[in-house]
Image (cartoon, rainbow, N blue to C red):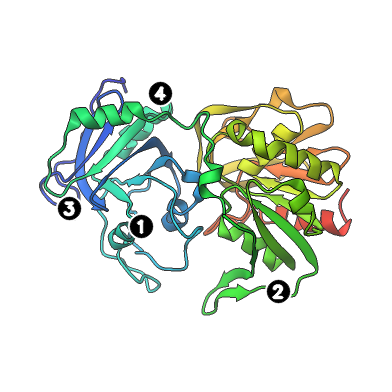
Amino acid sequence: MADNEKMTAPPTPTGGASSSTAALVLADGTVTYGIGIGAARTAVGELCFNTSMTGYQEIVTDPSYAGQIIAFTFPHIGNVGANEEDLESTTPAARGVILRMDITEPSNWRATRHLDQWLKSYDLPGIAGVDVRALTRRIRDGGPPNGVVAHSPDGKFDIDALVEQARGFPGLKGMDLARDVTCHQTYRWEEGGWTLGRGYAKSAPATRKVVAIDYGTKRNILRCLTDLGCEVTVVPATATAEEVLGHEPDGVFLSNGPGDPAASAGYAVPEIRKIVDAGKPVFGICFGHQLLALALGCETEKMKLGHRGANQPVKDFTTGKVEITSQNHGFRVIRESLPENVEETHRSLFDGTLEGIRLKDRPVFSVQYHPEASPGPKDSHYLFRRFTDFIDGKEG
Protein backbone atom coordinates (compact mmCIF):
# COMPACT_ATOMS: atom_id res chain seq x y z
CA MET A 1 0.00 0.00 0.00
CA ALA A 2 1.59 3.29 -1.07
CA ASP A 3 2.20 5.96 1.59
CA ASN A 4 -0.09 8.41 -0.16
CA GLU A 5 -2.91 5.92 -0.77
CA LYS A 6 -6.07 6.95 1.04
CA MET A 7 -7.75 4.45 3.33
CA THR A 8 -11.51 4.59 3.20
CA ALA A 9 -14.14 3.34 5.61
CA PRO A 10 -17.09 1.19 4.56
CA PRO A 11 -20.08 3.40 3.62
CA THR A 12 -22.06 2.37 6.70
CA PRO A 13 -20.43 0.20 9.39
CA THR A 14 -22.73 -2.40 10.92
CA GLY A 15 -24.75 -0.74 13.67
CA GLY A 16 -23.30 2.67 12.87
CA ALA A 17 -24.68 5.96 11.64
CA SER A 18 -24.80 7.05 8.01
CA SER A 19 -22.78 10.24 8.56
CA SER A 20 -19.15 10.52 9.65
CA THR A 21 -18.58 11.65 13.20
CA ALA A 22 -14.91 10.75 13.48
CA ALA A 23 -11.72 11.07 11.47
CA LEU A 24 -8.38 9.31 11.60
CA VAL A 25 -5.73 11.68 10.30
CA LEU A 26 -2.12 10.61 9.72
CA ALA A 27 0.96 12.80 9.62
CA ASP A 28 1.33 12.34 5.85
CA GLY A 29 -2.15 13.74 5.24
CA THR A 30 -4.04 10.45 4.90
CA VAL A 31 -7.60 10.87 6.16
CA THR A 32 -10.12 8.14 7.00
CA TYR A 33 -13.66 8.96 8.10
CA GLY A 34 -15.80 6.76 10.32
CA ILE A 35 -18.12 6.59 13.29
CA GLY A 36 -17.10 8.29 16.52
CA ILE A 37 -17.05 6.21 19.70
CA GLY A 38 -16.05 7.05 23.23
CA ALA A 39 -15.25 10.59 24.29
CA ALA A 40 -15.98 13.44 21.87
CA ARG A 41 -12.47 14.86 21.66
CA THR A 42 -9.16 14.64 19.82
CA ALA A 43 -6.14 12.48 20.72
CA VAL A 44 -2.71 12.24 19.09
CA GLY A 45 -0.21 9.38 19.33
CA GLU A 46 1.72 6.63 17.59
CA LEU A 47 -0.49 4.09 15.83
CA CYS A 48 -0.01 0.40 16.55
CA PHE A 49 -2.09 -2.71 15.97
CA ASN A 50 -2.98 -5.55 18.32
CA THR A 51 -3.97 -8.99 17.01
CA SER A 52 -5.67 -10.32 20.17
CA MET A 53 -9.18 -11.71 19.82
CA THR A 54 -10.09 -11.18 23.48
CA GLY A 55 -9.08 -8.97 26.39
CA TYR A 56 -9.68 -5.51 24.94
CA GLN A 57 -10.22 -3.99 28.39
CA GLU A 58 -6.93 -5.42 29.65
CA ILE A 59 -5.20 -4.14 26.50
CA VAL A 60 -6.54 -0.59 26.74
CA THR A 61 -5.65 -0.40 30.46
CA ASP A 62 -2.12 -1.79 29.99
CA PRO A 63 0.18 1.13 30.97
CA SER A 64 2.65 0.01 28.28
CA TYR A 65 0.34 1.62 25.69
CA ALA A 66 1.06 5.14 26.92
CA GLY A 67 1.40 7.49 23.96
CA GLN A 68 -0.21 5.04 21.52
CA ILE A 69 -3.48 4.69 19.62
CA ILE A 70 -4.50 1.03 19.34
CA ALA A 71 -5.97 -0.45 16.17
CA PHE A 72 -7.63 -3.79 16.90
CA THR A 73 -7.34 -6.27 14.05
CA PHE A 74 -10.15 -8.46 15.44
CA PRO A 75 -13.41 -6.95 14.13
CA HIS A 76 -15.77 -7.64 17.05
CA ILE A 77 -14.47 -5.39 19.79
CA GLY A 78 -17.00 -4.56 22.49
CA ASN A 79 -19.23 -7.59 21.99
CA VAL A 80 -18.82 -8.70 25.62
CA GLY A 81 -19.21 -5.19 27.01
CA ALA A 82 -17.17 -3.81 29.88
CA ASN A 83 -16.91 -4.50 33.60
CA GLU A 84 -15.03 -3.28 36.66
CA GLU A 85 -12.83 -6.38 37.04
CA ASP A 86 -10.91 -6.74 33.77
CA LEU A 87 -8.58 -3.80 34.32
CA GLU A 88 -4.79 -3.76 34.42
CA SER A 89 -4.49 -0.24 35.84
CA THR A 90 -6.67 2.39 37.48
CA THR A 91 -6.54 4.79 34.52
CA PRO A 92 -5.85 3.83 30.87
CA ALA A 93 -2.66 5.27 29.42
CA ALA A 94 -3.54 4.58 25.77
CA ARG A 95 -4.55 7.63 23.74
CA GLY A 96 -7.46 6.13 21.75
CA VAL A 97 -8.80 3.14 19.82
CA ILE A 98 -9.50 2.23 16.19
CA LEU A 99 -12.09 -0.43 15.34
CA ARG A 100 -13.31 -2.17 12.18
CA MET A 101 -16.94 -2.51 13.23
CA ASP A 102 -19.15 -0.25 15.27
CA ILE A 103 -19.68 -1.47 18.85
CA THR A 104 -22.61 -3.84 19.30
CA GLU A 105 -24.76 -4.24 22.38
CA PRO A 106 -22.89 -6.36 24.96
CA SER A 107 -23.70 -10.05 25.13
CA ASN A 108 -22.05 -11.42 28.25
CA TRP A 109 -23.30 -12.02 31.78
CA ARG A 110 -20.29 -10.24 33.30
CA ALA A 111 -20.92 -6.98 31.42
CA THR A 112 -21.97 -4.03 33.55
CA ARG A 113 -22.02 -1.44 30.76
CA HIS A 114 -21.52 -0.80 27.05
CA LEU A 115 -17.93 -0.41 25.87
CA ASP A 116 -18.80 3.01 24.45
CA GLN A 117 -19.90 4.15 27.91
CA TRP A 118 -16.74 2.70 29.41
CA LEU A 119 -14.55 4.61 26.93
CA LYS A 120 -16.43 7.82 27.71
CA SER A 121 -15.92 7.31 31.44
CA TYR A 122 -12.14 7.36 30.88
CA ASP A 123 -12.25 10.22 28.35
CA LEU A 124 -10.92 7.93 25.60
CA PRO A 125 -11.88 8.77 21.98
CA GLY A 126 -12.15 6.26 19.18
CA ILE A 127 -13.24 5.65 15.61
CA ALA A 128 -15.14 2.68 14.19
CA GLY A 129 -15.67 1.73 10.56
CA VAL A 130 -12.00 1.82 9.60
CA ASP A 131 -10.48 -0.70 7.19
CA VAL A 132 -8.12 -2.00 9.86
CA ARG A 133 -6.61 -4.59 7.51
CA ALA A 134 -5.40 -1.80 5.21
CA LEU A 135 -4.13 0.18 8.20
CA THR A 136 -2.31 -2.89 9.52
CA ARG A 137 -0.63 -3.46 6.14
CA ARG A 138 0.45 0.16 6.13
CA ILE A 139 2.00 -0.17 9.60
CA ARG A 140 3.57 -3.50 8.62
CA ASP A 141 5.18 -2.08 5.49
CA GLY A 142 6.09 1.42 6.62
CA GLY A 143 6.32 1.27 10.39
CA PRO A 144 3.99 2.92 12.93
CA PRO A 145 2.85 6.39 11.80
CA ASN A 146 1.85 9.24 14.05
CA GLY A 147 -1.81 10.12 13.83
CA VAL A 148 -4.83 11.78 15.36
CA VAL A 149 -8.22 10.33 16.25
CA ALA A 150 -10.84 13.08 16.23
CA HIS A 151 -14.38 12.38 17.43
CA SER A 152 -16.74 15.25 16.60
CA PRO A 153 -20.49 14.54 16.88
CA ASP A 154 -21.30 17.40 14.49
CA GLY A 155 -19.07 15.86 11.81
CA LYS A 156 -16.91 18.98 11.42
CA PHE A 157 -13.13 18.61 11.24
CA ASP A 158 -10.26 21.01 10.59
CA ILE A 159 -8.16 18.52 8.65
CA ASP A 160 -5.20 20.84 8.12
CA ALA A 161 -4.96 21.48 11.86
CA LEU A 162 -5.23 17.76 12.60
CA VAL A 163 -2.45 16.96 10.12
CA GLU A 164 -0.21 19.51 11.84
CA GLN A 165 -1.09 18.01 15.23
CA ALA A 166 -0.08 14.57 13.98
CA ARG A 167 3.16 15.91 12.53
CA GLY A 168 3.96 17.64 15.81
CA PHE A 169 3.86 14.41 17.84
CA PRO A 170 7.51 13.52 18.58
CA GLY A 171 7.07 9.74 18.52
CA LEU A 172 8.04 7.25 21.23
CA LYS A 173 11.76 7.07 20.51
CA GLY A 174 13.54 9.07 23.19
CA MET A 175 10.42 9.41 25.37
CA ASP A 176 10.62 8.63 29.09
CA LEU A 177 7.02 7.57 29.77
CA ALA A 178 7.64 5.39 32.82
CA ARG A 179 7.55 8.49 35.04
CA ASP A 180 4.04 9.25 33.72
CA VAL A 181 2.50 5.88 34.63
CA THR A 182 4.40 4.79 37.74
CA CYS A 183 2.89 4.91 41.22
CA HIS A 184 3.66 8.01 43.27
CA GLN A 185 4.29 6.24 46.56
CA THR A 186 5.16 2.82 47.90
CA TYR A 187 2.27 0.45 48.65
CA ARG A 188 1.49 -3.19 49.47
CA TRP A 189 -0.34 -5.30 46.90
CA GLU A 190 -2.78 -7.77 48.48
CA GLU A 191 -4.90 -9.24 45.67
CA GLY A 192 -4.59 -12.67 44.09
CA GLY A 193 -5.97 -14.24 40.93
CA TRP A 194 -9.57 -14.28 39.70
CA THR A 195 -11.82 -17.33 39.85
CA LEU A 196 -15.37 -17.80 38.66
CA GLY A 197 -17.91 -17.00 41.35
CA ARG A 198 -15.32 -15.63 43.77
CA GLY A 199 -13.71 -12.76 41.95
CA TYR A 200 -10.18 -11.80 43.00
CA ALA A 201 -8.69 -13.69 45.91
CA LYS A 202 -7.18 -12.21 49.01
CA SER A 203 -3.43 -12.57 49.27
CA ALA A 204 -2.22 -15.99 50.35
CA PRO A 205 0.00 -16.44 53.43
CA ALA A 206 3.35 -15.00 52.40
CA THR A 207 6.54 -17.03 52.54
CA ARG A 208 8.67 -14.66 50.45
CA LYS A 209 9.12 -10.90 50.22
CA VAL A 210 9.29 -9.32 46.76
CA VAL A 211 9.75 -5.67 45.85
CA ALA A 212 8.28 -4.75 42.46
CA ILE A 213 9.64 -1.64 40.77
CA ASP A 214 6.71 -0.05 38.95
CA TYR A 215 7.60 1.25 35.50
CA GLY A 216 3.94 0.80 34.49
CA THR A 217 3.09 -2.58 35.97
CA LYS A 218 0.03 -4.60 35.08
CA ARG A 219 -2.07 -5.76 38.00
CA ASN A 220 -2.09 -9.39 36.92
CA ILE A 221 1.69 -9.56 37.30
CA LEU A 222 1.32 -8.62 40.94
CA ARG A 223 -1.53 -11.14 41.32
CA CYS A 224 0.67 -13.93 39.93
CA LEU A 225 3.37 -13.12 42.49
CA THR A 226 0.81 -12.98 45.29
CA ASP A 227 -0.67 -16.34 44.29
CA LEU A 228 2.75 -17.93 44.77
CA GLY A 229 2.99 -16.76 48.37
CA CYS A 230 4.89 -13.53 47.81
CA GLU A 231 4.39 -10.46 49.98
CA VAL A 232 4.54 -7.79 47.27
CA THR A 233 5.67 -4.24 47.94
CA VAL A 234 5.43 -1.88 44.96
CA VAL A 235 7.81 1.08 44.70
CA PRO A 236 7.97 3.95 42.16
CA ALA A 237 10.16 3.79 39.05
CA THR A 238 12.55 6.33 40.56
CA ALA A 239 13.18 4.35 43.75
CA THR A 240 16.84 3.97 44.61
CA ALA A 241 18.54 0.65 45.21
CA GLU A 242 18.92 1.61 48.86
CA GLU A 243 15.14 2.15 49.12
CA VAL A 244 14.42 -1.15 47.40
CA LEU A 245 16.89 -3.14 49.49
CA GLY A 246 15.70 -1.36 52.62
CA HIS A 247 12.54 -3.47 52.44
CA GLU A 248 14.77 -6.56 52.84
CA PRO A 249 13.30 -8.40 49.85
CA ASP A 250 14.03 -11.98 48.96
CA GLY A 251 13.73 -11.02 45.29
CA VAL A 252 13.22 -7.93 43.11
CA PHE A 253 10.82 -7.69 40.19
CA LEU A 254 11.23 -5.18 37.29
CA SER A 255 7.87 -4.43 35.68
CA ASN A 256 6.66 -3.71 32.19
CA GLY A 257 6.14 -0.12 31.08
CA PRO A 258 5.95 2.30 28.14
CA GLY A 259 8.37 4.39 26.13
CA ASP A 260 12.02 4.13 25.19
CA PRO A 261 14.08 2.17 27.76
CA ALA A 262 17.17 4.21 26.87
CA ALA A 263 15.28 7.37 27.86
CA SER A 264 14.50 5.94 31.32
CA ALA A 265 17.94 4.40 31.76
CA GLY A 266 19.48 7.46 33.43
CA TYR A 267 17.63 6.96 36.70
CA ALA A 268 16.75 3.24 36.44
CA VAL A 269 19.87 1.46 35.18
CA PRO A 270 22.35 2.50 37.92
CA GLU A 271 19.92 1.33 40.60
CA ILE A 272 19.29 -2.00 38.84
CA ARG A 273 23.04 -2.58 38.68
CA LYS A 274 23.30 -2.07 42.44
CA ILE A 275 20.44 -4.50 43.04
CA VAL A 276 22.07 -7.15 40.83
CA ASP A 277 25.41 -6.59 42.60
CA ALA A 278 23.64 -7.12 45.93
CA GLY A 279 23.02 -10.72 44.88
CA LYS A 280 19.24 -10.64 44.98
CA PRO A 281 17.23 -12.77 42.53
CA VAL A 282 15.87 -10.45 39.83
CA PHE A 283 13.06 -11.05 37.34
CA GLY A 284 12.15 -8.56 34.61
CA ILE A 285 9.24 -8.44 32.17
CA CYS A 286 9.07 -6.40 28.93
CA PHE A 287 10.29 -2.87 29.79
CA GLY A 288 11.91 -4.33 32.90
CA HIS A 289 13.65 -6.87 30.64
CA GLN A 290 15.01 -4.04 28.50
CA LEU A 291 16.20 -2.02 31.49
CA LEU A 292 17.85 -5.09 33.00
CA ALA A 293 19.59 -5.74 29.68
CA LEU A 294 20.89 -2.17 29.63
CA ALA A 295 22.12 -2.59 33.20
CA LEU A 296 24.00 -5.73 32.15
CA GLY A 297 25.75 -3.91 29.29
CA CYS A 298 23.41 -4.69 26.39
CA GLU A 299 21.88 -2.25 23.91
CA THR A 300 18.27 -1.66 22.82
CA GLU A 301 16.64 -0.31 19.67
CA LYS A 302 13.21 0.66 18.36
CA MET A 303 11.55 -2.01 16.23
CA LYS A 304 9.97 -1.33 12.87
CA LEU A 305 6.68 -2.93 13.93
CA GLY A 306 6.81 -4.21 17.47
CA HIS A 307 4.95 -7.23 18.80
CA ARG A 308 1.40 -6.76 20.09
CA GLY A 309 -0.99 -9.66 20.40
CA ALA A 310 -1.84 -12.86 22.25
CA ASN A 311 -0.67 -15.33 19.60
CA GLN A 312 3.13 -14.95 19.49
CA PRO A 313 5.20 -18.18 19.44
CA VAL A 314 8.38 -18.16 21.52
CA LYS A 315 10.92 -20.93 22.10
CA ASP A 316 12.42 -21.44 25.55
CA PHE A 317 15.95 -22.72 24.98
CA THR A 318 16.25 -23.91 28.59
CA THR A 319 13.47 -26.48 28.09
CA GLY A 320 13.20 -26.77 24.31
CA LYS A 321 9.47 -26.03 24.49
CA VAL A 322 7.50 -23.58 22.36
CA GLU A 323 4.94 -21.42 24.12
CA ILE A 324 2.25 -19.11 22.77
CA THR A 325 2.71 -15.74 24.40
CA SER A 326 1.05 -12.37 24.90
CA GLN A 327 3.24 -9.45 23.87
CA ASN A 328 3.27 -5.67 23.78
CA HIS A 329 6.56 -4.00 22.96
CA GLY A 330 7.98 -1.63 20.37
CA PHE A 331 11.63 -1.80 21.48
CA ARG A 332 13.95 -4.79 21.76
CA VAL A 333 17.34 -5.89 23.08
CA ILE A 334 20.00 -6.24 20.39
CA ARG A 335 21.24 -9.84 20.42
CA GLU A 336 24.70 -8.92 19.14
CA SER A 337 25.22 -6.66 22.17
CA LEU A 338 24.98 -9.44 24.77
CA PRO A 339 28.16 -9.57 26.88
CA GLU A 340 29.91 -12.86 27.61
CA ASN A 341 28.19 -13.43 30.95
CA VAL A 342 24.65 -12.99 29.53
CA GLU A 343 22.93 -15.70 27.48
CA GLU A 344 19.80 -15.74 25.37
CA THR A 345 17.06 -17.97 26.80
CA HIS A 346 14.03 -17.21 24.60
CA ARG A 347 13.52 -16.32 20.94
CA SER A 348 10.54 -15.26 18.85
CA LEU A 349 9.58 -17.77 16.17
CA PHE A 350 7.89 -14.98 14.20
CA ASP A 351 10.93 -12.84 13.41
CA GLY A 352 13.81 -14.13 15.54
CA THR A 353 13.69 -11.29 18.06
CA LEU A 354 15.53 -11.97 21.32
CA GLU A 355 12.80 -12.66 23.91
CA GLY A 356 14.67 -13.60 27.08
CA ILE A 357 18.05 -13.44 28.81
CA ARG A 358 19.73 -14.57 32.01
CA LEU A 359 23.01 -14.08 33.79
CA LYS A 360 25.14 -17.20 33.69
CA ASP A 361 26.41 -16.87 37.25
CA ARG A 362 23.55 -15.23 39.18
CA PRO A 363 19.79 -15.73 39.71
CA VAL A 364 18.91 -12.91 37.32
CA PHE A 365 16.67 -13.32 34.26
CA SER A 366 14.04 -11.56 32.17
CA VAL A 367 11.65 -12.01 29.25
CA GLN A 368 10.41 -9.58 26.63
CA TYR A 369 6.82 -10.86 26.62
CA HIS A 370 4.02 -11.06 29.23
CA PRO A 371 3.84 -14.41 31.09
CA GLU A 372 1.08 -13.05 33.35
CA ALA A 373 -1.22 -12.62 30.33
CA SER A 374 -4.81 -11.98 31.26
CA PRO A 375 -7.09 -13.29 29.78
CA GLY A 376 -4.41 -15.53 28.29
CA PRO A 377 -2.65 -17.52 27.02
CA LYS A 378 -1.14 -19.00 30.20
CA ASP A 379 1.66 -21.05 28.64
CA SER A 380 4.31 -18.88 30.31
CA HIS A 381 3.08 -18.83 33.92
CA TYR A 382 5.97 -21.16 34.78
CA LEU A 383 8.31 -18.17 34.75
CA PHE A 384 6.85 -16.89 38.01
CA ARG A 385 7.60 -20.28 39.58
CA ARG A 386 11.10 -20.07 38.12
CA PHE A 387 11.52 -16.76 39.95
CA THR A 388 10.29 -18.15 43.28
CA ASP A 389 12.52 -21.19 42.81
CA PHE A 390 15.48 -18.82 42.47
CA ILE A 391 14.37 -17.13 45.68
CA ASP A 392 14.09 -20.53 47.40
CA GLY A 393 17.50 -21.62 46.12
CA LYS A 394 16.07 -24.39 43.92
CA GLU A 395 17.44 -23.00 40.65
CA GLY A 396 20.99 -22.12 39.84
Q: Which residue is denoted by mark 3 in the rendering?
A: 16
Numbered mark located on residue 122 in the image: 1
The disc, 3 or 4, on the residue closer to the chain's N-terminal end is 3
The disc, 4 or 2, on the residue closer to the chain's N-terminal end is 4
Q: Residue at x 26, y 64 (%)?
A: 105
In this rendering, the answer to whether 87 lies above or below 17 is: below
The disc, 1 or 2, on the residue closer to the chain's N-terminal end is 1
Residue 29 in sight? yes
Give the residue type that dot 3 points to.
Answer: Gly
Residue 10, horizontal then vertical, whole percent: 18, 41
- Assign a secondary structure to mark 1: loop
Closer to viewer: mark 1 or mark 2: 1
Q: CA distance from mark 1 to mark 3?
A: 22 Å
What is the crowding at mark 3: few (fewer than 14 residues within 10 Å), some, or many (at least 20)? some
Closer to viewer: mark 3 or mark 2: 2
Contact, mark 4 vs mark 2 (Cβ under 8 Å)? no
Residue 130 placement: quadrant: top left
Q: CA distance from mark 3 to mark 4?
A: 30 Å
Contact, mark 3 vs mark 4 (Cβ under 8 Å)? no
Contact, mark 1 vs mark 3 (Cβ under 8 Å)? no
- Assign a secondary structure to mark 3: loop
370 relative position to 88: left or right: right
Residue 305, horizontal then vertical, whole percent: 48, 31
